[in-house]
Image: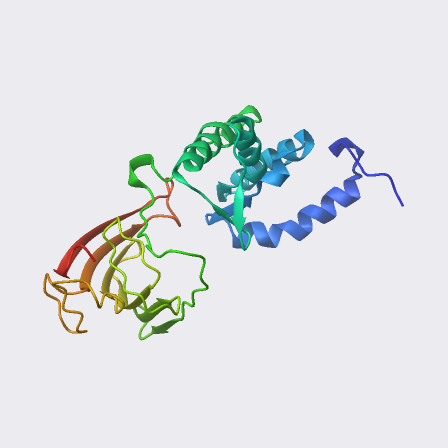
Amino acid sequence: MNAPLKELKDVSPAIKAEVLAQALPYIKKYHGKTIVIKYGGNAMTEERLKEGFARDVILLKLVGMNPVVVHGGGPQIDDALKKVGKAGTFVQGMRVTDEETMEVVEWVLGGEVQQDIVMLINHFGGQAVGLTGKDGGLIHARGQCWGGNYVAVQPSIEYAATSKLTLGFWATTNFKSDYFYPDGVSAYKGYQEIDFYLYYQLTDFLQFQLWDYYWPSVSKVEGVDNSYFNYGTNGSKTVDAILYFDFSEGYQYPFNATISTLVQGNFLS
C-alpha cells in the first residue's frame, strides 16, 4: 500500500489532469446551483479535516457553485454540557432538549461552532457569513404539543397537475386518542393533523401556496366545534395563503422569503 499523499505538490501532473477531467462534467452541471453541505460535529475534531473542508468549500465557490453549510456540533454540545454539570439525553437517537440545555445548544452552535467555521473559511480566502434560525426570523416552526415518546406516521402525496400547479396531501398521527389543543401550555398525548395544499408557480422566483389545516384530535375542548367543515373561530381548521419568494438558483445573492396570512379559521389552531 502506498503512503498517503500529504501535499498537493506530491500529486503527479497525470493524476491532477485525470481528476480535473472527471470533475469537469459535474462543474458544468452544478454551475450556478446552490449546494447544501451537511458538516457534522465529528468531522470538526481534527485540524487537518477542518482545513480540508474549508478549502473544499472555497473551491466549490470558485468553480461557480453557491455552497451553503449546515453544520452540526454534537460532540461540542456534549463537552459544553459537561462543563455546566449536565448530561446529554437521547431518545431513539434524537437529542431531548430542555430549556436550560437549549441555551447551551444555542451558544455552542451559534456562538462557537458557527464562528469557527466562518473564520476558517475566511482565513483561506473565502467570504463566509454565519446565520442562525433566529436571525431575521429566518426559520419558523409550528410546535407539536404531545407528551411522551411515541412513534408518529406522516404519509404524504404530491401530484403535479401541470408544470406550474402542484396538489398535495400531508398527515400525521401518533395513534393516541387523547385530545390535543395547541395553546402553548397543555401537553396531551394525542396528535393528529390532516393538511391539503396547492402550489402555483407564478414566476421563476415566486410561488403561491394555499394550505388547509385540520386537527381532528381537538375533540374534547370546551367551546370547540371539531367538525371538518367548520372554518369559524370556534373550530379546529385554518386556511393559510402564502407567497414564497425563492432566489436560491440563478441569482448573484441567493435567498428566500415567505409572506403568510390567515385566510379563514381559528388562529389558535
Q: Quadrant of the C terminus?
A: bottom left
Residue at 32%, 70% (x, y): give it: 168
From this viewpoint, is residue 6 visible?
yes
The N terminus: image quadrant = top right
**Is 174 in front, or is 117?**
174
> Does residue 171 lie above or below 30 as drawn?
below
The image shows residue 126 at horizontal and vertical percentages of 52, 30
Q: Is residue 129 above or below residue 188?
A: above
x 64%, y 33%: residue: 45
Q: Residue at x 24, y 58 (%)?
A: 181
**Relative depth, front residue between 189 and 41:** 189
Residue at 27% across, 67% down: 217
Is 206 positioned to the left or the right of 13 in the image?
left
Q: How many marks?
A: 0
- Residue 202: tell me if it is visible: no
Q: Where is residue 206 shown, x and y percent of the image?
A: 27, 55
Occupied quadrant, residue 176: bottom left
Provide residue 163's location: percent of width, then percent of height: 33, 70
Report the front residue among 55 and 133. Answer: 133
Q: Is residue 127 left or right of residue 246?
A: right
Q: Establish if 59 lies above or below 210.
A: above
Q: Residue 142, position in %: x, y?
A: 30, 52
Instruction: Choose top left, top right, bottom left or bottom right for residue 76.
Output: top right
